[in-house]
Image: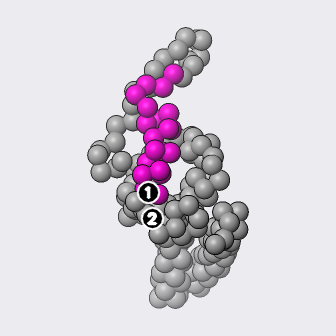
Amino acid sequence: MKSQKAQNQYLSVKLLTLQAEARIIKAKEAKWRAAARSALVRQKQQAADSNYNVFWGLKLHRIRVVRPHARACNIAQAFLRGKKYVEVERTIDPTRYAFCGITHNQLWDMVANNVTTFGVKYAKNKEEAKKDLAAWRGEHPAYQEKVKRPSIRGEMWYLPKLHLYEHHL
């Protein structure tokens, strides 16, 4: 049985791989965008179109696939290391990755998969991981009834509870 510290190394490697993949894709995007622009200057519309298709395919892969997976890995890593959720994400927007086709539930399913894969305590017990993740996530001030926030004038005002649909929780 591997220790939790050893398992975190595997998650760190996955995160580093996703970061490297994003950097590589971004460099390839720049190459294909430059090729498309030079084709337009030479008035080669067909070549420009095919180059732009490759560029947009790479960009959408980076944004729609790599970015949400990297976020899920970061959240899972913070959970396994015992950090507070508010330290990872100060503001919560459940629709942040809606343009990627990733719902709030799908993101937390990816986080739960990472936790069960890389967490020694949660190995082969996804339901316990989901329960603990929900409790951990619920400690975030945005999920509380009212949150005290200082105003500019020095008085306190209250932020209402973040209204999420049941299927988001």
Nearer-the-camera pick, 20 or 74? 74
Name the amino acid type tagged 2: Asn
Name the amino acid type tagged 1: Glu
The image shows residue 31 at horizontal and vertical percentages of 65, 79
- Residue for point 65% across, 53% down: 81
Helix, strand or loop at label 1? It is: helix
Where is residue 108, by image quadrant?
bottom left
Is residue 136 covered in magenta? Answer: yes
What label sits on residue 128 in the rendered view? 1
Query: Which contiguous range is marked in magenta?
Result: 128-148
As drawn, is 109 to the left or to the right of 6?
left
Q: Residue furthest front?
A: 1
- Residue for point 56% across, 44% down: 85
Pointers 2 and 1 in contact (C-beta within 8 Å): yes
As drawn, is 74 to the left or to the right of 133?
right
What label sits on residue 137 in the rendered view? none
Nearer-the-camera pick, 30 or 85? 85
Query: How many numbered marks appear?
Result: 2
Picture layout, residue 20 above or below residue 50: above
